[in-house]
Image (cartoon, coloured by chain):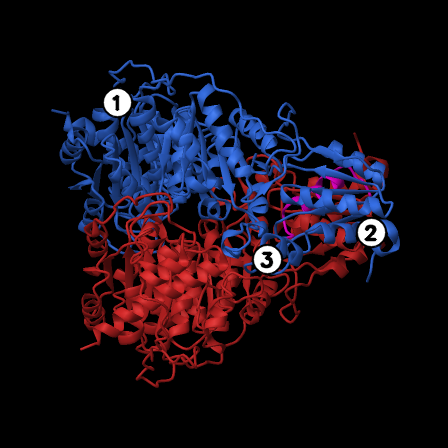
Chain colours: A red, B blue
Amino acid sequence: MPDETFLTELGQQLRVDSVRCSASAGSGHPTSSMSAADLIAVLLSEHLRYDVAEPHDPNNDHLIFSKGHASPLLYAALKAMGAIDDDELLTFRRFGSRLEGHPTPRLPWVDVASGSLGQGLPIGVGLALAGRRLDRLPYHVWVLCGDSEMAEGSMWEAFEHAGFEHLDNLTAIIDVNRLGQRGETMHGWDLRAYSDRARACGWHAIEIDGHDVGAIDDAYADALATADRPTVIVARTHKGRGVKAVDDAEGAHGKPVPDAEEAVRELGGERNLAVAVTKPESRGTPHRFEPQAVPWPRYDVGGDPVATRKAYGEALAALGATRPDVVALDGEVSNSTHAEIFRDAHPERFFEMYIAEQQMVAAAVGMQVRDWVPFASTFAAFLSRAYDFVRMAAISRADIRLCGSHAGVAIGEDGPSQMALEDFASLRAVHGSAVLHPSDPNQTAALVAAMADRPGISYLRTSRGAMPTLYGPDERFAIGGARVVRGGDDVTLAGCGVTVHEALKAAERLEADGIHARVLDLYSIKPIDADVLHAAADETGAIVVAEDHWPEGGLGEAVLSALAESGAQVPVVRLAVSDMPGSGEPEELLHAAGIDADAIARAATRLVGAPETAGRAR
Amino acid sequence: MPDETFLTELGQQLRVDSVRCSASAGSGHPTSSMSAADLIAVLLSEHLRYDVAEPHDPNNDHLIFSKGHASPLLYAALKAMGAIDDDELLTFRRFGSRLEGHPTPRLPWVDVASGSLGQGLPIGVGLALAGRRLDRLPYHVWVLCGDSEMAEGSMWEAFEHAGFEHLDNLTAIIDVNRLGQRGETMHGWDLRAYSDRARACGWHAIEIDGHDVGAIDDAYADALATADRPTVIVARTHKGRGVKAVDDAEGAHGKPVPDAEEAVRELGGERNLAVAVTKPESRGTPHRFEPQAVPWPRYDVGGDPVATRKAYGEALAALGATRPDVVALDGEVSNSTHAEIFRDAHPERFFEMYIAEQQMVAAAVGMQVRDWVPFASTFAAFLSRAYDFVRMAAISRADIRLCGSHAGVAIGEDGPSQMALEDFASLRAVHGSAVLHPSDPNQTAALVAAMADRPGISYLRTSRGAMPTLYGPDERFAIGGARVVRGGDDVTLAGCGVTVHEALKAAERLEADGIHARVLDLYSIKPIDADVLHAAADETGAIVVAEDHWPEGGLGEAVLSALAESGAQVPVVRLAVSDMPGSGEPEELLHAAGIDADAIARAATRLVGAPETAGRAR
């Protein structure tokens, strides 16, 4: 039987400290913290199993604030748990403080960044999958959700997936404080609106008064005792609870309470309660899969053409054999991305995420929290569905690998909805990312291996169509490198993926005209190999860059950036997809887009043959 | 009582034509078409109200193929309706044909592009909202959905929103053929999994055998007779129905049937049935709101600082008065984006979309189908949630306007999850987009007006903090333009938004050192004003570009692109946010990121004072 007085007092302390740190910052979300204070007080005191001194203990439960703006509550809880002191609490939102406006893993007790709503629960699904199927440890995943964020479809991807997977090691707590940023939510205090939907997704749903510490305690116990399905606790709460000026009041979102001193008085004053969070009973070690010795895939120069997506699947399966920490996720297209080769080799480490790309990327982020090495794949076009999740993964300092197949007009008949002509641009603009696009199966395999060891977000674009093998199986390819595929000093032709092959054809034609073209394979678009580019600029004096991508933000601009960085002055002509493509055969579409061998050769001839046309034409 | 024989025959014809056009193309999705053939046959013959000769008649029903890969079925239906002939049908997926792999509005009978799953239903919600609240016409919106795409959270955003809005003019038809691309869906033929969730969202749900034409007919009649809530028809079907080799068979997705001739025989051979789709009974004209004469907002140079987000709201409200076709949507942050000013002025044309950015952008796309002029706003960071929808909107040739507020490290304390440091890059890489970022309230207002008249996707980034007014209220600003804010011939300092103000401060400091800096306000990042840039390059010989954005794909690379386009050779130093920011005051974060006046002045001094350091340093 818990000490209800202590729990109530602890809840009040969390409110007081939320008010205090927000007042000190002059900004923040105290009222969104106050609604959930009792929910968190009971969880910390009675049910969480967590070693505060060892935040990376694999047996720890995980607590994710999906409503990341309730960071004052999180930091107040960390103080009560003895993780931070009161002085640090009052650095909230200050320059240099690790207590940021929204939580990030700069704090060792925070698994992932939140602050873009609707992401914490899908990440929690990933952690729960890791606990069940990878680590095979009994840790529990608790996710504090806001009611406003239930409007995000990604939350329902999580509900559906967790229900389907029977994740009884996952509990979602919905803080139904009725009020969003600018007014009431769709459902107000209609708790049933949430629980009916959750039950329809196969969850156990409990409706409670979120300020009744006894009811909260019972609900958590019920959640832990529920087998075979996840539990959602739908808790009716008051935003700003306990301070009359803001209690259940509109217009009080995202700002300090009007009179912090008076509010603290009203809440019963400052307290200094310490909550001794119970350490996990389990002292298990995470499950480890057995490594196997398998041959690395090798492709022969001059052999049958191979699609790089096929090489991705083969390399990933081989990598998974030697690296038992590698796991794969796919968005219901594993027969196209060829992630199915991994699935067949390592079924226990393969996760079918269905057509829910947000949940797929979130699950990868959750799994890497537990040090697994996830590769997530779908058509490149559909990774754009999870762009916000990738952006946030960078803020989470997450190490994840993404593979997008079937990109570019070179896919042919399926048309522009499947072409991902924006993937280089959008994924280059993710902090710390690598953006890779191989032209050959041996190169693909080498990059897959390199991605496994790379921190941060790594993205690999693979191609639909089979292409000739350019490189021997023993050549090495590093992220950040490039390849001179063909020598020549009159002009440089640079590309990646299919445009390397087009550039090679163009170089042959130019050779017939007496123009010796150098061909660069810029398979690493970010980071890009500046040395190879500078050498090409110096030694050939003119560069044509061709890419199967829109003109903005892709390979062409990456080349310009690298050259500008060092002040190199060289004419650069960029060929890219400018008009909206339709369907057609790959060759037809490459030609129509002006990125095939014809176009490259023409551009090179103009640059070299008549240099004045490279000058400004205004 | 419908003629069941005719309906059955029509369904078979749609199957035959799906098989034929896919066989002719050598690719495509006939089996996903065959499952839904009876559903579409009954709809066309009995319930759709549509004038095939006048596809833009405002009284027409709308039929959206959310499962866009069932394009063979759509094209077979268009043939049966007399919209296209058999010769054109057989151009499916050929280069130049408007019968693309996935439907696009190159066909006048197609409202929006599909092919990225999970988008058709949320767009249908936008159309149904337009029918109910804007056009006020009784047209019905029918959306054919796949069962695989029900895993996309965006579908549940649509279910929730349509239920909340009681959209009884919307019917979703789920073609539950059990099989996704690589195997069974999560729920197989468990129709209740779908209908329970839909009912929990306030929908009327009907489960039927999707090959029983009588049951289908009854279900449609039931949907049309159901008041006050949308209806979903959950139809159990067979993928590949009617052809033994592929009927309910795995491994038959996304490819022609193995023996098309035999399949056509098995389906009873070719037919040439014509279906006379009933024209709409209603001949109403769409509701038009009354224009009002209101003053355009004016801000005085030297007056109180104004945030551009505030100017956005004020300009949009004024625009809405004179332009009764303008509508606004917001993602539950209208008190921050200031869309609430429009809401208060024009409540009938304001749509609260809650925290569901995908549904918000989809609704805007749906509304512009009916010629409304939507502006959709949220924090810039959260538009990344809808990136796939924006990408697809470009393929839909949609005219929508997006406003993202609170971007850049200049937001300060809220931290990186709210900073949208990738918005320029991601939105420049959308076909035909404009990307705008004003530095001043009068400029903001002018750009809001210009966006209303611009086809395609227009994006405006607004700022959180108030800034001084730089321009008089009568200055004109065109999309694609730029402004020389300060003259000078020694060096150019270019920026947009807050960095214009930092550049001005830097120019003052440089002046004290005898360096005359020109300051450019590149408020139109795409299209960019190449003339102003070339003049600056020629006349000042060196350019510093500063932006509150990651280094990739933003203003700096846009400048490099414009200069490279013409072969201009000028040193360009780019300042951008390179390290992951935390929380802090705006000035602290601008300084730490190296994009404030200090950093700009320092870069300019280095460029001008010691030109050799601008050279290659390897």
Image quadrant where one finds the N terminus of chain B:
top left
Badges 1 and 3, same chain: no
The magenta segment is B551-570
Q: In this image, A488 relative to A67: left or right? A: right
Q: Which tag is nearer the camera, tag 1 or tag 2?
A: 2
For the residue pair A517 and A374, the one nearer the viewer reads as A374
For the residue pair B597 and B132, the one nearer the viewer reads as B597
Residue B558 position, x and y percent, is: 67, 42
Q: For residue B240, which quarter of the picture?
A: top left
| Residue A415 seen in the current view | no
Check contact, mark 1 vs mark 3: CB within 8 A.
no
The numbered mark 1 sits on a residue in which chain?
B
Disc on res. B546: none
Disc on res. B605: 2
Badges 3 and 2, same chain: no
User: Residue under circle 1?
Assistant: B138
The numbered mark 2 sits on a residue in which chain?
B
Badges 1 and 2, same chain: yes
Image quadrant where one finds the C terminus of chain B:
bottom right
The numbered mark 3 sits on a residue in which chain?
A
Report helix, strand or loop for mark 2: helix
Q: Which residue is drawn at 64% across and 53% down?
A: B590
Check contact, mark 3 vs mark 2: CB within 8 A.
no
Q: Which tag is nearer the camera, tag 3 or tag 2?
A: 2
User: Residue under circle 3?
Assistant: A435
Residue A277 position, x and y percent, is: 33, 78
Above or below residue A5? Residue A611 is above
Q: For residue B221, which quarter of the picture?
A: top left
Residue B262 position, x and y percent, is: 31, 41
**Crowding at label 1, few (<14), some or many (≥20) Cα neighbours within 10 Å?**
some
